[in-house]
């Protein structure tokens, strides 16, 4: 009896003294010690992260949200039998007489000003949001990784130049700059989703460069990079084949959160009339048009608002959890 | 710091310069501008010079403290600052106030109950408000609290402090998540330090460990975040300012863009950059004061 208490106290103490061995997930302390003992050889950084993640319910919530919005983007037909701009599944026109009806069994989210099924409109809104988010994130990552490689790999003048440029960009007020850039890129009539992608992407890269530069600095001094260099590999090859795969993780985690942020920023810009064109099925436009009709038809505001919120939420939760799982200091 | 200032201001200059449309014509609508008037404008704003030269001339005026005059109504930008900066500052300081009095205790609470049900709950709530676009929150608050329930003024600044209350809460709610996360993460890291274990081993109670040992040493990242956020917020308030019709700095820039009032856009944007950099500089100084290990020699 006495002996077992003592053992218990001992493990408590070692846990307290070496907190970096204790895993983060709730209640997993005992089992993780067993894991350590049994399959020590199989443990890798990614496997650790995965083990940590799959125990957390909110990880699955985020994964579900992302899966739903991605499938809404690729196959919206799965979610609604009605095509956008039509009144019902048999493909008839929308009736103006049905304008702005509240939610019902026929029209789950009610109808819009034109009398069209609002659930369909809102569902198809995922498409343009996610497309812009993906495009803008791709632009951000490309510029970020290119400049980050240059700054991290060749220190000295190039590094100083790029770092000062980043500081300059970060000092600009983001939304002000985005609104101005979008006014520059095209007039209201000629603006399309490519302009929005380009503007958001062109302003988002400084944070990525900072992060990627730090990863490159860490990786480039590792022995296998020195080995590749000694074997005569070109700088481009070293950066692409050896540095990139090992420096990518933090940037990709940021990009996950970034997807959520871009969805939100795009809706904000569109709401202010400098984002997507008025005729696009976009949540920002639906919300902007609904504010004036709020007293009579709040559903016009609340449903696209909810979609916008949950679409953003999935990516932000996922990014945050990935960051936590991959950061050894937070374990 | 100084090169960064020149890079940022030059970026602003380039971006504004490529804005489509003729800023002079924009002031006259469809009417024809008399030639002598157009020449007076060109002369006043040095529009016949090359872009780098315009920048140099503008900077020369700026260094004497002169931000120029508005194209639209010939009002001095400096006078506009005097009128509009206090409104943005009032809003921003209310936001920081709400963020601090709620963010720090909640962050401490989450850190002390790490990985518990409470902590996970706080995590979900903070991520949820982070995912809520500010404009959506602002519109909802305006429509529900203002229009439907009539609890707050919904637009303008006629009602004194009351006018700023709702917009400030909106901004604070949507950005408080960052504060809570930083406080939590920093405290968790601090709790692992040797001196915390020493304090606990000496028998100090948890309140003393937290207040005297942990919190004070965690202040640096918290102050940094608060400071940097204050600097970037003054510009970021433009969404809330526009929706609640508060004529502060961000509002002024946004409404000057369709008018092509380039001097307002440039002057106010540069002012925001200066504010951002000045606050970052002050935060650096605070660093040294909070952490005696850091010295700027």
Image (tube, grey):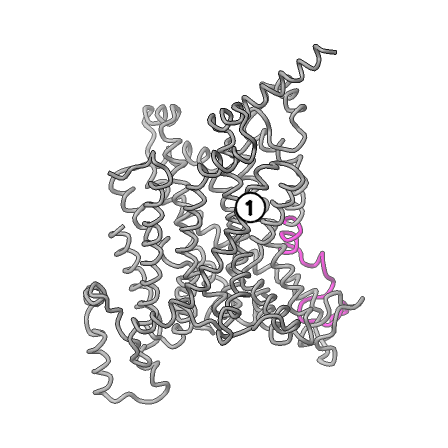
Q: Is residue B99 visible?
A: yes
Residue A76 colored in magenta in the image: yes
Residue A6 colored in magenta in the image: no
In front of the other: A124 or B163: B163
* As drawn, B69 above or below A212: below
Residue sitting at the far right: A105
In front of the other: B244 or B15: B244
* As drawn, A229 above or below B73: above
Q: Is residue A192 visible?
A: no
Q: Which residue matches tag 1?
A: B105
Question: Which quadrant of the figure contains the C terminus of chain B?
Answer: top left
Residue at 55% from the left image edge and 46% from the top image edge: B105
In front of the other: A15 or A138: A15
Q: Which residues are magenta?
A: A66-91
Residue at 45% from the left image edge and 60% from the top image edge: B92
Residue at 53% from the left image edge and 44% from the top image edge: B181
Q: Position of residue B13 (x, y in %)?
A: 29, 64
Other-residue count near label 1 (Cα within 10 Å), few / some / many at <14 / 14–19 / ≥20: some
* As drawn, A229 above or below A306: above
Chain of the residue under label 1: B
Mark 1 element type? helix
Q: Position of residue B229 (x, y in %)?
A: 43, 53
Name the image quarter holding residue A280.
bottom right
Name the image quarter holding residue B111.
top right
Count of numbered badges drawn on the protein: 1
Q: Is residue B18 left or right of residue A322?
A: left
Q: Position of residue B120 (x, y in %)?
A: 64, 42
In front of the other: B142 or A136: B142
Q: Is residue A255 left or right of residue A54?
A: left
Residue at 42% from the left image edge and 33% from the top image edge: A241
């Amino acid at each position: 009896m006495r002996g077992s208490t003592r053992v218990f106290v001992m493990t408590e103490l070692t846990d307290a003294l070496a907190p970096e061995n204790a895993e983060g997930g709730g209640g997993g302390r005992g089992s993780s010690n067993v894991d350590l003992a049994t399959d020590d050889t199989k443990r890798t950084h990614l496997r650790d992260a995965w083990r940590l993640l799959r125990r957390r319910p909110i990880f699955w919530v985020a994964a579900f949200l992302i899966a739903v919005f991605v499938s809404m983007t690729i196959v919206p037909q799965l979610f609604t039998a009605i095509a956008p701009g039509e009144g019902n599944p048999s493909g008839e026109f929308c009736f103006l007489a049905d304008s702005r009806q509240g939610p019902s069994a026929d029209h789950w989210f009610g109808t819009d000003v034109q009398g069209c099924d609002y659930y369909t409109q809102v569902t198809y809104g995922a498409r343009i949001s996610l497309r812009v988010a993906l495009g803008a994130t791709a632009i951000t990552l490309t510029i970020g990784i290119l400049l980050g490689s240059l700054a991290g790999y060749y220190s000295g003048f190039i590094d100083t130049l790029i770092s000062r440029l980043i500081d300059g960009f970060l000092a600009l007020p983001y939304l002000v700059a985005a609104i101005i850039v979008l006014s520059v890129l095209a007039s209201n009539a000629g603006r399309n989703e490519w302009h929005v992608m380009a503007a958001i992407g062109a302003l988002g890269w400084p944070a990525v460069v900072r992060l990627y530069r730090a990863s490159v600095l860490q990786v480039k001094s590792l022995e296998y990079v020195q080995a590749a260099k000694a074997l005569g590999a070109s700088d481009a090859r070293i950066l692409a084949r050896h540095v990139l795969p090992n420096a990518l993780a933090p940037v990709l985690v940021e990009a996950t959160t970034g997807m959520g942020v871009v969805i939100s920023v795009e809706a904000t810009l569109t709401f202010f009339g400098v984002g997507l064109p008025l005729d696009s099925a976009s949540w920002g436009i639906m919300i902007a048009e609904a504010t004036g009709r709020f007293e009579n038809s709040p559903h016009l505001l609340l449903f696209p608002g909810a979609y916008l919120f949950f679409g953003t939420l999935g990516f932000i939760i996922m990014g945050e959890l990935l960051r936590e799982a991959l950061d050894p200091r937070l374990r | 710091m100084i090169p960064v200032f020149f890079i940022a201001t030059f970026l602003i200059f380039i971006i504004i310069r490529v804005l489509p449309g003729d800023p002079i014509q924009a002031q006259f609508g469809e009417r024809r501008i008399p030639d002598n008037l157009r020449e007076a404008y060109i002369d006043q704003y040095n529009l016949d010079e090359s872009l780098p030269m315009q920048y140099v001339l503008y900077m020369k005026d700026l260094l004497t403290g002169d931000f120029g005059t508005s194209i639209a109504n010939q009002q001095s930008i400096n006078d506009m600052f005097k009128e509009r900066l206090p409104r943005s500052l009032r809003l921003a300081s209310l936001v920081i106030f709400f963020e601090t009095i709620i963010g720090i205790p909640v962050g401490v609470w989450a850190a002390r109950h790490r990985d518990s049900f409470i902590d996970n709950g706080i995590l979900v709530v903070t991520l949820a408000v982070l995912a809520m676009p500010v404009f959506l929150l602002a519109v909802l608050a305006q429509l529900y609290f203002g229009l439907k329930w009539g609890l707050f003024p919904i637009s303008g600044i006629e009602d004194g402090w009351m006018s700023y209350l709702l917009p400030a809460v909106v901004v604070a709610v949507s950005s408080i998540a960052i504060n809570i996360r930083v406080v939590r993460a920093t405290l968790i890291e601090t709790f692992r330090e040797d001196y915390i274990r020493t304090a606990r081993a000496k028998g100090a109670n948890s309140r003393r460990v937290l207040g005297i040992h942990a919190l004070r040493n965690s202040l640096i990242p918290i102050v940094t975040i608060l400071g940097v956020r204050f600097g970037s917020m003054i510009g970021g308030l433009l969404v809330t300012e526009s929706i609640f019709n508060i004529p502060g700095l961000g509002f002024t820039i946004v409404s000057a863009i369709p008018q092509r009032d380039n001097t307002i856009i440039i002057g106010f944007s540069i002012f925001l950059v200066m504010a951002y950099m000045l606050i970052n500089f002050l935060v650096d100084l605070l660093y040294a004061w909070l952490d005696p290990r850091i010295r700027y020699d």
